[in-house]
Image (tube, rainbow, N blue to C red):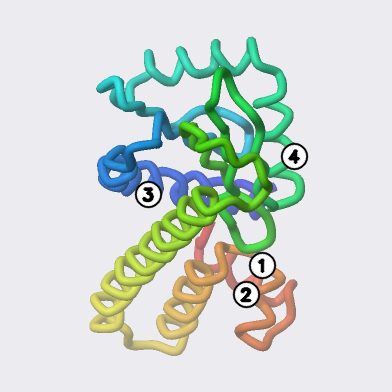
Amino acid sequence: MMIREVKTDTVRNNLNLIVQLMSYIAEDFKDISCMDSIVVFDYELRPVFYEDKNNLVNTKESRTLFVSYMNKHREIKRAFREVLKTGEHLKIKNEGNKMFLVLPIEGVNKPIGIVGITYESDGCHHEDCTTDQIFKEMMSLFITKYRELKEKEVMASMASLTCGLKSLEDYERFAILKTGNRCNWNITVMAKELEIGRNTLYNKMKRMGIH
């Protein structure tokens, strides 16, 4: 149970960082003439970000509005669930000449959330039209930026931590913390990286109070 809670907290922290960065990147997205709106949902299909070109900024009210809209358009909710399940993008036709592109936010083993982009179609309904590719590449760059930022943040905290390392246990704790952040706190992956048994790692974390 403790391990599951740690992983849940890590995913939530990752999404919080994504939301912070999205506040900046949404401005660039909204400069694209065909772009209409952008929404982010977590892995439990809860809205964490929504903005559109009508100067609707990310607030609880704006997210609630989109949830109401989604509840009226069941195909959007079905697309969200499918992308979370498969990790593959989906595109569906929205109202009028608008398209809705759903992209996964990849985690270690499965998506930790999804991004939905509504845009004005130029008449191309192919699965991978040029506009889709542009949005996918922009999101890929965005996710890369997020991961690099996270890595820099982790390395900065680890660098300050190394100054106080004195005992063997201090170094073990440092290695576990660093590996945990890098592996999204997946115990199996961490144990493989550290070249120790899964139970051994779990017992060390328990002894050191790493929850």
Residue at image mark 1: 187
Relative image position of residue 163 (x, y in whole percent): 24, 83
Residue at image mark 2: 190
Near-viewer residue (81 or 204): 81
Q: For the point 45% across and 32% down, which residue is it?
A: 48
Name which of mark 4 and mark 1 comes first in the sequence: 4
Q: For the point 33% across and 42% down, which residue is it?
A: 32
Name which of mark 3 and mark 4 comes first in the sequence: 3
Kindly indicate whether the residue at mark 1 contacts the one at mark 4 (C-beta within 8 angstroms).
no
How much space separates mark 3 and mark 2, taking CA atoms? 22 Å
Name which of mark 2 and mark 4 comes first in the sequence: 4
Mark 3 residue element: helix
Frontmost of labels 4 and 1 is 4
How much space separates mark 2 and mark 4, taking CA atoms? 29 Å
Residue at image mark 3: 17
Q: Which amino acid, by three-letter code, is at mark 1?
A: Ile
Mark 4 residue element: helix
Frontmost of labels 2 and 4 is 4
Kindly indicate whether the residue at mark 1 contacts the one at mark 2 (C-beta within 8 angstroms).
yes
Numbered circle sitting on residue 82 = 4
Q: Which amino acid, by three-letter code, is at mark 4?
A: Glu
The image quadrant that residue 159 belongs to is: bottom left
